[in-house]
Image (cartoon, rainbow, N blue to C red):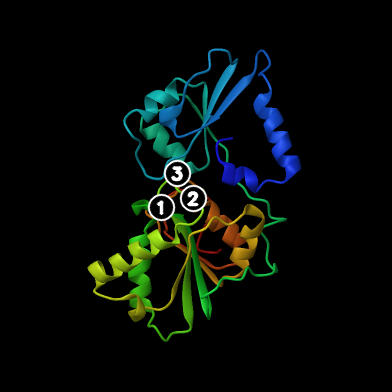
Amino acid sequence: RNSDNFRSQLDRRTRKHLDALLAKAAPSNFVSVQHFPAYAFERDPQAAYNVGRVMFETDSLPADWALRCNQMDEIWVPTDFNVETFRRAGVIARLIKVPGGIDTARFRPGLKPLRVPGARGTVFLSIFEWIYRKGWDVLLRAWAEAFAPDDDVSLVLRTYPVNAADSPDTTAEIENRINCFLQEALGKSREQVAPIVVLGAQIPEPRLPRLFAAADVYVAPSRGEGWGRPHMQAMACGLPAIATRWSGNLEFMNDDN
């Protein structure tokens, strides 16, 4: 409701439908399902049943999360990894595994690739928020060590600073962060590594499958995932996916796929 950029990407019919739902009063005896980080869970006293849908990316929880979860009637998490984490952290509310999913009619092989200026050769793609957990430092270090400037490869990053997913364009900010890391941590300039292409502008959801089609490999060396939706989207589009052998993405990633 509060993102004009998000609303502008919706077709008129979808926007009208969502607006009608937002304006609709809840019926009596309703079930409340809250999709938030657990620190924001609030039991609705008008609801007949309160469900919290949540995930966490590591093997422990913040101190107040278990208390917030335990005020709910039921907690939905997407993975066995999260079931174990939440239970071990002291969540005694009923825990149900409700896996994530994607629309495989949209995310599929054979789509027309999205044009990505600057990409060349074998294209490695990564999509993430620029936070430490996502392992951007691991990715950049590995890229700088694995490939030379003349290698026929490119790394395409659809990334953005924290809480800036709706910003019109954050390319300049991300470019500066990449340059600083390469220079300060590795002693290299941008010209001394294989091409890195930054996509700092939001890509509308209908065009996202075509971004995967523009790549040859998906790579995500993160330090923890609650699920790993881009991993799954890439795999559905037929891309080899390189990811960390740990946390939520192991719900659907294994040595055979």
- Tell me: residue 156, above or below residue 83: below
Residue shown at 65% from the left, 49% from the top: 9
Q: Quadrant of residue 62?
A: top left
Spatial distance from mark 1 to mark 2, Cα to Cα?
9 Å
In terms of depth relative to the viewer, which is nearer, 193 or 44?
Answer: 193
Q: Residue 130, percent across and down?
A: 40, 54
Helix, strand or loop for disc 1:
loop
In terms of depth relative to the viewer, which is nearer, 252 or 196?
Answer: 196
Badge 2 crowding class, 10 Å Cα cut-off, few under 14, some 14 to 19, many 20 or more, is: some
The residue pinned by badge 1 equals 161
- Tell me: residue 126, above or below residue 224: below
User: In this view, which residue lies farthest toward the right?
Assistant: 13
Q: Residue 256, percent across and down?
A: 54, 64
Q: Residue 232, percent across and down?
A: 57, 56
Q: Which amino acid, mark 3?
A: Phe
- Tell me: residue 148, above or below residue 200: below
Badge 1 crowding class, 10 Å Cα cut-off, few under 14, some 14 to 19, many 20 or more, is: some
Q: Seen in the image, is 227 located left or right of residue 138? A: right
Residue shown at 60% from the left, 70% from the top: 214
Helix, strand or loop for disc 2:
loop
Q: Which amino acid, mark 2?
A: Ser
Classify the position of the C terminus by image quarter. Answer: bottom right
The residue pinned by badge 2 equals 167
Q: Residue 229, percent across and down?
A: 54, 51
Q: Seen in the image, is 97 located left or right of residue 69? A: right
Q: Is residue 100 visible?
A: no
